[in-house]
Image: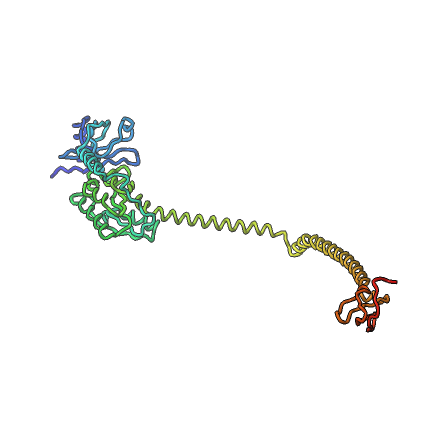
Amino acid sequence: MQQKITVSELTGLIRQNLESAFPQLVVEGELSNFRPSSSGHLYFSLKDPGAKIDAVMFKNRLSFLDFEPRDGMLLRVRGRISVYPQRGNYQLVCEDMELAGVGDILAMLEKRKRALAAEGLFDEDQKKPIPRFPGTVGVVSSPTGAAVQDILNILRRRAAGVRVIILPALVQGEGAAAEIARRIEQANQWRLADVLIVGRGGGSLEDLLPFSEEVVVRSVADSEIPVISAVGHEIDNALCDLAADLRAPTPSAAAELVSSSRSEALEKIISLQEDMEGAVKSRIDRARLLIRPFSIDDLERRFRAILQPALLRFDDAKESLVHSLQEKLRGWRRRLELAATSLEAGSPLAVLDRGFSVVLNETTGKILRRGIEAKPGDKLTIRPREGLVRAVTEESTAAYQ
């Protein structure tokens, strides 16, 4: 206790001893907690049933990789031990990496995947359509996790009228799978939502295992409410992704999916409104341009220019009709005069005016046209132009003597 050293000195001694003791070594273990960084380096852990060690592979060594690392792979890594003083931990700095086989977890998941697929739980014809405008969205996740907050923020921004029901559940560790399945079943039992988002934020392969448990996969497949699986990040995979009606790469993406139709419809309506307003305004502007040259005097002049030729043609037609009628009237008048003359010439009165008389037999009332028709003793009535003469037949002959 009399000899004191600083933390940096202690860490330096540890670093010196560790790095000199393990300048080069080959380690075999299962890949876990794989997380590429934005700088291009790969950070991950290697583990076996008894221990775990952090590791890093810098981007200048990535060109030598001939496969894409994924959690659960069994790897053989060549590298050296390094101490990171700022954090006081040690890690394996990898120079090379190769596949050593399939990890226990991946093998177990692959076996479970084949068994469930054989039952038809992943068939596409079993998928239900996601409602276009859900009124209520149920979220099965940890109520304190960042995933729920991301979902709430996105729905609040993109679809403020949508109700959100949080169905709290553990998302990792012992008992998580049973609780997730129970929340899905409760949502269906009470018909709590129009669509369910089941998921969590990113994590290691072990952290995401509850979402690949058989009880969760079956609950998702049996759900009458459409389910969107949103487990981890885009590179993460869980078996419930295959059983869900739709898979979202992240919880935030799931929130965007259930609100996209509403926002897209609103954008479409706004776009159509703007198009209609623009079309109406364009027509009004065009109409204004067309009527601008037409003043009241100009319109009257144009109207007269159209009307006057028609009036002239009407006057000409009227005069022609009147003339034709007059000619016809004159013709009819001449014919009438000739008819009157003919009638007057054939009138009995005109004949009587010339000295003729009408002789009737008083007994029979017949007009005598021949002298032989009168018998001696017949009483006759003679009608000259004026007056009346009665006579008695003394003698009649058949012809003039």
Q: Is residue 355 above or below residue 31?
A: below
Image quadrant containing the N terminus: top left
User: Which color scheme did the rendering employ for the protein?
Assistant: rainbow
In the image, residue 302 lies at what x, y percent?
67, 53
| Residue 65 showing in the rendered view | no
Question: In the image shown, does 217 or 77 lie closer to the viewer?
Answer: 217
Give the residue at x 46% y 49%. 274
In the image, residue 171 lies at what x, y percent?
21, 44
Left or right of residue 14: residue 58: right
Left or right of residue 192: residue 266: right
In the image, residue 273 lies at what x, y percent?
45, 50
Give the residue at x 80% y 68%. 375
Residue found farthest to the left: 1
Q: Quadrant of residue 26?
A: top left
Question: In the image shown, does 106 or 189 lie closer to the viewer?
Answer: 189
Give the residue at x 26% y 33%. 42
Question: In the image shown, does 91 or 182 lie closer to the viewer?
Answer: 182
Give the residue at x 21% y 33%. 55
Q: Quadrant of residue 253?
A: top left
In the image, residue 348 lies at what x, y percent?
80, 65
Question: In the image shown, does 166 or 401 lie closer to the viewer?
Answer: 401
Left or right of residue 292: residue 47: left
Q: Quadrant of residue 301?
A: bottom right
Image quadrant containing the C terminus: bottom right
| Residue 39 showing in the rendered view | yes
